[in-house]
Image (cartoon, rainbow, N blue to C red):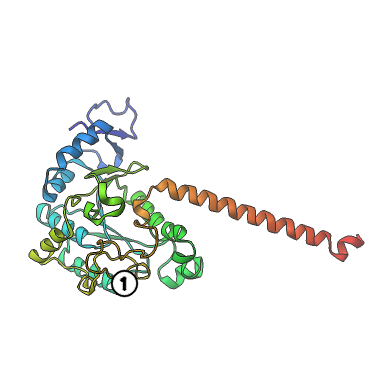
Amino acid sequence: MSIQLERSLSHEQDPLESGYESCTNSISSLQTIYFTPPHLKYINSQLQELEPEAILQWCLLTLPGLYQTTAFGLSGLVTVDILSKISPKKPVDLIFLDTLYHFKETLELVDRVKKRYNNVDIHVFKPQDCESADEFEQKHGERLWETDDNYYDYLAKVEPAERAYRELEVKAVLTGRRRSQGGKRGDLDIVEIDDAGLIKINPLANWSFKQVKEYIDKHDVPYNALLDQGYKSVGDWHSTQPVKEGEDERSGRWKGQAKTECGIHNKRSKYAEYLRQLDMQQQEQALTEALKKVEQEQGSPEAIAV
């Protein structure tokens, strides 16, 4: 398959024309995987007709640097279980972003998943230099998700995800997104490439919530106890509610807000621009305070006497 890969080695150092390094070299030295738009369109047209198991087999054969990002929702758990069956000796590692505000039921589920799939490594990434919600709030203030939700998403999700991708040398990630979840997910492709070049694969994009739940029940896959209390999509405790009969699956997330996605599935450029504007505001504020201090010093009796 004509996948092109950029490498850190120069042409003189590596005379091979093949897209992959030889088996004697490290896969981690592959810097970037990219598809041409026509090739990506063709891949999606072919994968669109396949079941999740076949899509995941394609991923295992095709993509180096493959990981699964998960908050242990139902779709992600189905993916973990399928992979445990088709690739038991070479499991795909998981990346879990611990925002420090997960429900206790979610954290209990993580422990159950570790016991059930004990050969799968789970890499946990938290907000930078924070081990607890108390530490996070001491650094960034209380209820940041209400006072500045963009900054909260960046600190709790986007920055930890970027750190995970960098430290683990991630080239491609499996997600649990599905078209039936609605919102921006309604027109998902099986394979996408984000604005930073990361390949995202949505193996269950074609499945409904009913199909996912049937798989969970049939294969006795551990799941979040909150699902039995009316929740269908579970995120942070402060922004997740149960859903009513007939409501969209993710309608309990950020209820009453014009928001349907957490930070990791928005464009990274959005947060780069946000941080740039935030930095400019902080610089302007510091300059204003410095000028005010100078004016106060010049207007003081001591300064007049001099």
- Can you say whether 56 is above or below 94 in the image? above
- From the top left corner, tell me how far across and down residue 119 is, in percent: 17, 60
Q: Quadrant of residue 49?
A: top left
- From the top left corner, tell me how far across and down residue 164 is, in percent: 34, 54
Three-letter amino acid code at the position of disc 1: Phe
**Residue toward you, 161 or 39:** 39
- From the top left corner, tell me how far across and down residue 107 is, in percent: 28, 70
**Residue toward you, 256 or 97:** 256
Q: Quadrant of residue 199?
A: top left
What is the quadrant of the C terminus in the image? bottom right
Q: Is any part of residue 289 visible from this angle?
A: yes
Q: Which residue is mark 1?
A: 103
What is the quadrant of the N terminus in the image? top left
Q: Is any part of residue 23 visible from this angle?
A: no
The residue shown at (48%, 61%) is: 148
- Can you say whether 180 is above or below 23 in the image? below
Q: Quadrant of residue 224?
A: bottom left
- From the top left corner, tell me how far across and down residue 271 is, in percent: 44, 50
Q: Return the residue found at the far front.
A: 246
The residue shown at (41%, 55%) is: 159
Image mark count:
1
Assign a secondary structure to mark 1: loop
- Can you say whether 59 is above or below 293 in the image? above
- Can you say whether 169 is above or below 304 in the image? above
Within-10-Å neighbours for mark 1: few <14, some 14–19, many 20+: some
